[in-house]
Image (tube, rainbow, N blue to C red):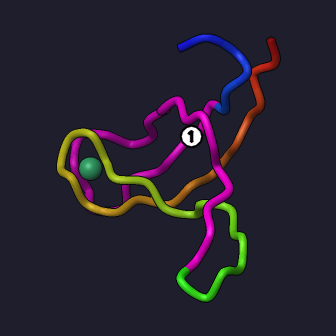
């Protein structure tokens, strides 16, 4: 993925072999159904597909 994008670190809490994982996202702010913008706080673990917790969001600039 070309910058700018965000490197998002997540933590899996299910006890699967993945402890932390990193994904790249173009956008980390989403709009809720009520129209309020919010920053993503959960990520799907690539190994077990359970919801993990976002621990770090790092902006990668162009
Ligand atoms: Zn997992």
Query: Residue 20, relative to residue 39: is it above or below?
Result: above
Residue 19: quadrant of the picture? top left
Image point (53%, 14%), residue name: 1
Tell me where residue 3 appears, x and y as whole percent.
69, 15
Label 1 beta carbon within 8 A of ligand 1? no
38 with respect to 50 (left or right): right
Range drawn in magenta: 7-32
- Image height of 46 relative to 3, above or below: below
How many marks overall?
Answer: 1
Q: Is residue 15 left or right of residue 42?
A: left
Please tell me which residue is depicted at 58% across the width and 63% down the height of the picture: 41
Residue that appears at 62% across and 31% down: 7
Helix, strand or loop at label 1? It is strand
Position of residue 5 measured from the top left corner of the image (x, y, whole percent): 67, 27
Taking depth in this image into account, of 29 and 12 the one nearest to the observer is 29
Q: Looking at the image, which residue is at 61% across and 11% down?
A: 2
Residue 2 on the magenta segment: no
Q: Quadrant of the C terminus?
A: top right
Residue 34: % across, % down: 61, 88
Indicate whether residue 15 is drawn in magenta.
yes
| Residue that label 1 marks | 9
Q: Residue furthest right?
A: 61
* Left or right, 13 with reference to 35: left
For this rendering, which residue is in front, 37 or 52? 37
Residue 59 appears at what percent x and percent y? 77, 31
Task: Reply above or below: 57 against 32.
Answer: above
Mark 1, Cα crowd under 10 Å, few <14 / some 14-19 / many 20+, is some
């Amino acid at each position: 993925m070309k910058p700018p994008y965000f490197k998002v670190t997540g933590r899996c809490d299910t006890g699967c072999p993945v402890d932390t994982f990193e994904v790249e996202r173009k956008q980390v702010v989403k709009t809720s159904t009520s129209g309020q913008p919010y920053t993503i706080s959960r990520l799907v673990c690539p190994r077990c597909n359970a919801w993990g917790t976002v621990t770090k969001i790092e902006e990668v600039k162009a």
